[in-house]
Image (spheres, rainbow, N blue to C red):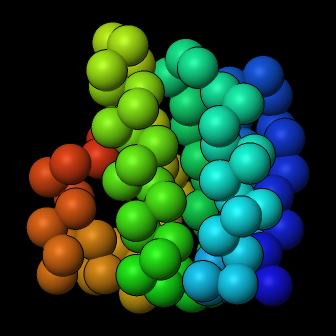
Amino acid sequence: MLKIEEVSENELKFIGEFSASQESIATDKLSKHEETLTIDMGELKYISSMGLGVLVKTNHRLNENGHSLRLKNLNSHIKDIFKFTRLDQVFDLID
């Protein structure tokens, strides 16, 4: 299960597992943001291909308006997923 906490106006924290069953919850939450958004993934243990797709769509939407989606505190497993899918070249990954 995915829990999404609002850290500040332009920062969210993802906690738990971002699977396909959580797609609508994440999409609803992310769609409310229109400016550069940072997601703290320090407590995210798993992300599915559907979860990656939601992030890609959000990043694309924000890029169209001159903003971006920044991801920070990825654990080694999640960071590897972004490297293997080459999404580390799409997103601004912050340690």
Taking depth in this image into account, of 62 and 14 the one nearest to the observer is 62
Query: Which residue is drawn at the image coordinates 46% and 55% (left, top)?
Result: 55
In the image, is residue 66 above or below residue 78? Answer: above
Question: Position of 80 compared to 95: left or right?
Answer: left
> Does the image show residue 76?
no
Question: Position of 73 compared to 15: left or right?
Answer: left
Find residue 26 and report its image quarter: bottom right
Taking depth in this image into account, of 25 and 47 the one nearest to the observer is 25
In the image, is residue 46 above or below residue 72? Answer: below
Query: Which residue is drawn at the image coordinates 35% and 73% (left, top)?
Result: 79
Query: Which residue is drawn at the image coordinates 61% and 84% (left, top)?
Result: 19
Taking depth in this image into account, of 10 and 32 the one nearest to the observer is 32
Looking at the image, the residue that sits furthest to the top is 66
Query: x%, y% of residue 67?
Result: 40, 19
Taking depth in this image into account, of 42 and 25 the one nearest to the observer is 25
Query: x%, y% of residue 40?
Result: 62, 52
Query: x%, y% of residue 3?
Result: 84, 68
Count of labels shown?
Answer: 0
In the image, is residue 47 above or below residue 23? Answer: below
| On-image quarter of the N terminus | bottom right
In the image, is residue 87 above or below residue 32? Answer: below
Query: Which residue is drawn at the image coordinates 39% and 40% (left, top)?
Result: 59
Question: Position of 15 compared to 55: left or right?
Answer: right
> Does the image show residue 18?
yes
